[in-house]
Amino acid sequence: MNYFQLFANDQTHNNWLLFKESKEMPYLTVEPEFNRFVCVKCKAINHDAAFENGFSSDVKIRARGNIFISSDGFFCFDDTVRQIIETAKFKGIKFKKLVGTGWNVISLTCRVRADESVYEYSKQKCAACKRPREVLGFIRFPSQIKVPDFAGTFFTPKFDRGGKMNMDRDLFVTEDIALRFKKEGLKGGYFERLLSKDEEVNCRKAIATKQEFKWPKGTKILL
Ligand SMILES: [Zn+2]
């Protein structure tokens, strides 16, 4: 079975779920009811706790396509995607409806072991919450993550990416989910396949010898 990571396209408009934007200083403030989920210093968010708490009932979303990531790092699927997932009984995901919109915040419940050294953390850490200021790197190979045995599963590493405010965790799916998204004509992002063992060997060789690695055909599914 193949496995893919889902990426959302950039959006033209900012969509904040915990913050409020204003035209004057300070340009960005945390809504008081969500203060406890946000680090006072670096604005890092505890996405899990915020999800469990729920969101404001008067958020307005301006987003294109069927999926987007909010400016504060919450993956959101519209009602169409939610219905497809619930009808197909795909696992590893739960939803919180954004009241008054056609959108849902998602949270990934299937959390698996993964190689944390894949992520490169910057040495600079927040003085208040100790999170690294920046995180780079992506999981590329099944050897770096404990992939699920069953089809129809969303999954993510046990640890989040940390550091970055606008991207909480990496979202992986089994192949059937990626193909279903494509077949249903869903828009707003793309899937990238984890490389096979042979491809991993070639990729590592290319990196070691500083040569360009050609991504094999079919590694990317554009929505
Ligand atoms: Zn902090």
Image: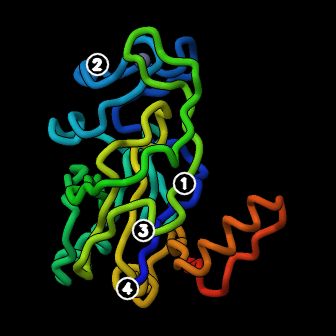
> Callout 3: 10 Å neighbours few (<14), some, many (20+)?
many
Q: Are marks 1 and 4 in contact (CB under 8 Å)?
A: no
| Sequence order check, earlier mark of 2 and 1 | 2
Q: Nearer the viewer, mark 4 or mark 3?
A: 4
Residue 138, numbered label: 1
In this orientation, which residue lies closer to the viewer: 222 or 118?
Answer: 118
Q: Are marks 2 and 3 in contact (CB under 8 Å)?
A: no
User: How far apart, in angstroms, are the residues tagged by discs 2 and 1?
Assistant: 30 Å
Q: Is residue 203 left or right of residue 37?
A: right
Q: Nearer the viewer, mark 2 or mark 4?
A: 4
Badge 3 marks a residue whose secondary structure is loop
Residue 96: x %, y % from top left: 20, 52
Q: Nearer the viewer, mark 2 or mark 3?
A: 2
Q: Is residue 159 left or right of residue 211?
A: left
Residue at x-position 26% and y-position 82%: 151
Ligand 1 position by quadrant:
top left
| Residue type for callout 3 | Asn
Q: Are marks 2 and 1 in contact (CB under 8 Å)?
A: no
| Sequence order check, earlier mark of 2 and 4 | 4
| Residue type for callout 2 | Asn
> Callout 1: 10 Å neighbours few (<14), some, many (20+)?
few
In the displayed structure, would residue 136 be above or below residue 124? below
> Callout 4: 10 Å neighbours few (<14), some, many (20+)?
few
User: How far apart, in angstroms, are the residues tagged by discs 1 and 3?
Assistant: 24 Å
Residue at x-position 75% and y-position 59%: 208
| Sequence order check, earlier mark of 1 and 3 | 3
Query: What residue is disc 3 on?
Result: 66
Query: What residue is disc 2 on?
Result: 35
Query: What residue is disc 4 on?
Result: 1
